[in-house]
Amino acid sequence: MFTTRPEILGTFGIVTSTHWLASAAGMAMLEKGGNAFDACVASAFVLQVVEPHLVGPSGEVPAVFYSAKTKKVEVLCGQGTAPNGATIDHYKREGLKLIPGNGMLATVVPGAFDAWMLLLRDHGLLSLREVLEPAIYYAEQGHPLLPRVADTIKGLKEFFETEWPTTAAVFLPGGEVPKPRQLFRNPQLADTWKRIIREAEAKGSDREAQIEGARSAFYKGFVAEAVDAFVRKTEVMDQSGSRHKGVLTADDMAKWQASYDAPQTYEYHNFRVNKIRPWGQGPVFLQTLALLKGFDLAAMGPTSGEFVHTVVEAMKLAFADREAYYGDPDFIDVPIQTLLSDAYNDERRKLITDKASLELRPGRVDGYEAQVERTLKALRELSTTDKKVSGGEPTLASMRSARRGDTVHIDVVDRFGNMIAAMPSGGWLQSSPVIPELGFMLNSRAQMFWLEENLPASLAPGKRPRTTLTPTLAEKDGDPYMVFGSPGGDQQEQWQMLLFLRHAHHGLNLQESIDLPMSHTAHFPSSFYPREQKPGHLMAEETYGAEVLDDLRARGHEVEVAPAWTVGRLVAASRDKDGLLHGAATPRLMQAYAVGR
């Protein structure tokens, strides 16, 4: 089958990410003698520089990884929690019914930095300075600005100048929109990282002590102090149409640490799929597999109307359960074993017919009836609210739009047998104003929360938002095999599902699976402000062909045809039993790349 680029093959290492410079930086760490975890951290910091409209230093990251040393699959939880002052009462007193998609009140504790330091300390081999050097170089010396970054800045130029002048000072140098594909610098961000390194190295030559010093500088030192002062003093215009101060404090940052978590798993044929637990949307993927297990997908063409219809109808049911049941397991009881059980899914599967559903249909679990009804009531009331303002993380349409944030992704496999899938996000340039002493913005992940009481994802201090970030690690025949992911908010699971099923059932390699036409639905409520919902919606690339698109319309789908090569940002890597490594990256948006040897 023709592919837009070759599937990368090698035995030494593969790094694949949503930007070629990040992939190259990660590969440089492998060449220096580092492992997959060093490479992932270096790639992540470069992405904060070269894709500032998609991720920043104050964002968050979940990662799922296999360590050849520990022989375990684990989840790295770099999702910060709601500040102590983030109560429903406070937000309602601010006149809000929904948490805005940007501004100070949308901010939770920055989680990514501590997560990267924890991973580097426990599983990496290289020093803090070595893994940060590529990002510092591109921030200080400049990097070729992506056209989409320039378009984002252009679309928000007046807003930045009027409302967020500290952002204008960084992203509108000389008062002008920076030109695409020309060098762009953020020297203040480079200075922040260099100061962190100086303070870390002042702890001595011990590698772990230096990493601990970096964590302290960020969460208890000058970074936290600058964040605290800026949040306290700055009233910010946000998507609610009003100005608000935030509630994040240095104390919130000092009390939080990244952690490791057990993965949520599901056995599917000869695969064991590892996702994050229901503090994120990861189990949607697993629930969908539990439903699809009852269909002969291998007998359906990988781009056929029957295949697309079956997958999307299963995903509608799984996403409906996400709305009704998912939230931080440290705060609520999520009946995840029931949701993944054969008995539950055997009944749910009967709802999938040859016609598209136009309803949001969460399942009923004994003891949770009142919770489900509260959720559906909140969603019904939301349907009458004003949805003119768009924001948050993107649906597919906003991949061609300038103003929404998104996410990035990194997959790495190395010669030692380590592998990691990481989904950094948040803290993009549209999320909140730049903190001038630091050169970066705060995140907006709190928009995942509801301001209604007693819902699974209701706002509460110390609670993790129900994130959409959802990396995947699949084991095959008992061995760690494949890492993959895609940015795209609520679409992440949907695009990943198409990749996985085409690879697992149709024998397509990683690049072939990514290059085939992509599709997704916005049938269920968006996780992002202002929580749009499009019953029966199905976005499909025109490359499916008229016959398939007509078939989907005949089944009752509200088909929205997307231009060719505009849906999804998938990247993937895998390792065979004999040590042969594979890597692939989407040609869509013309920036993701897999490198390796």
Image (cartoon, grey):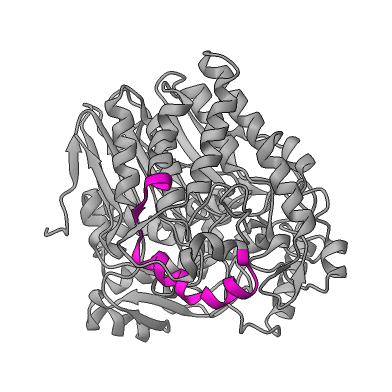
Give the overall secondary structure of the magenta segment. Answer: helix
* Residue 266 in the figure: left or right of residue 218: left
Which residue corresponds to the image point at 57% horizontal and 52% vertical from the top-left? 440
What are the residue bounds of the magenta stretch?
138-165
- The answer to whether residue 549 is above or below residue 493 is below
Q: Is residue 149 magenta?
A: yes
Residue that sits furthest to the left in the current view: 2
Looking at the rendering, in which quadrant would you find the N terminus? bottom left
* Residue 481 in the figure: left or right of residue 129: left
**Residue 62 picture location, percent across and down:** 53, 43
Q: Is residue 116 visible?
A: yes
Which residue corresponds to the image point at 65% horizontal and 61% vertical from the top-left? 448
- The answer to whether residue 306 is above or below residue 51 is below
Compare residues 493 and 24 and report the one nearer the observer: 24
**Residue 39 picture location, percent across and down:** 37, 33
Looking at the rendering, in which quadrant would you find the C terminus? top left
Compare residues 64 and 43 and report the one nearer the observer: 43
